[in-house]
Amino acid sequence: LRGHPYSIVLLDLMLPDSRFLDTLAAVPRLKTAGAQRIIVITGLDEASLDQLVATSGAESVISKARPGFPANLRSLVTSRSSATPFAK
């Protein structure tokens, strides 16, 4: 991302080439590199995940397992700032 700032980064923790905690550990580096908003996407639906992601510095975490995922994600992406930091 260096030299190419992005206004938003969607970070999917469940991609085949992603290792969950290593990917999450990249969030502070992404922010340092200029990413203004980071939204973490996961297939897990666990309340404990919210706290883990919150401490990483990501703006929001959204679960693909929860009803309304596409609409919730679209809402987060199109809003200038998330009204609810951790979308359920």
Image (cartoon, rainbow, N blue to C red):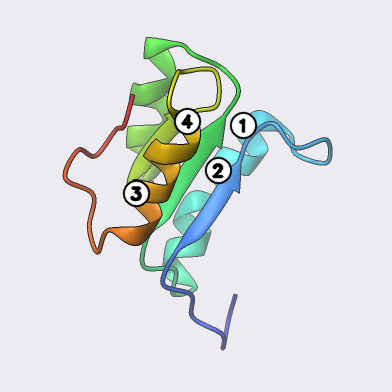
Residue wearing tag 2: 25
Is mark 2 in CB contact (under 8 Å) with mark 3?
A: no
Secondary structure, mark 2, is helix
Nearest the viewer among 39 and 34 is 39
Which of the two discs, 4 and 1, labels the residue nearer the N terminus? 1
At 51% from the left and 59% from the top, the residue drawn is 9
Quadrant position of residue 22 = top right
Quarter of image, res 65: top right
Q: Residue at x 27, y 58 (%)?
A: 79
- First-in-chain label (2 vs 3): 2
Q: Is residue 82 left or right of residue 41?
A: left
Residue farthest to the right? 17
Disc 4 target residue:
69
Label 3: element kind = helix
Q: Is residue 19 left or right of residue 9?
A: right
Q: Are marks 2 and 4 in contact (CB under 8 Å)?
A: no
Q: Amino acid at mark 4?
A: Phe
Q: Residues within 10 Å of mark 1 (few under 14, many from 20)?
A: few
Calculate the distance from the C-alpha at mark 4 to the C-alpha at mark 1.
22 Å
Q: Quadrant of residue 8?
A: bottom left
Residue 26 can be seen, yes or no: no
Label 1 belongs to which residue? 21
* Dot 4 crowding, Cα within 10 Å, few <14, some 14–19, many 20+: some
Closer to the eye: label 1 or 3: 3
* Mark 2 or 4: the one toward you: 4
Q: Earlier in the sequence, mark 2 or mark 4?
A: 2
Quarter holding the C terminus? Answer: top left
The amino acid type of the residue labelled 2 equals Ala
Q: In the image, residue 41 lies at what x, y percent?
A: 53, 37
The residue that mark 3 highlights is: 76
Q: Label 1 near label 4: C-beta < 8 Å?
A: no
Q: Dot 3, crowdedness within 10 Å: few (<14), some or many (≥20)? A: some
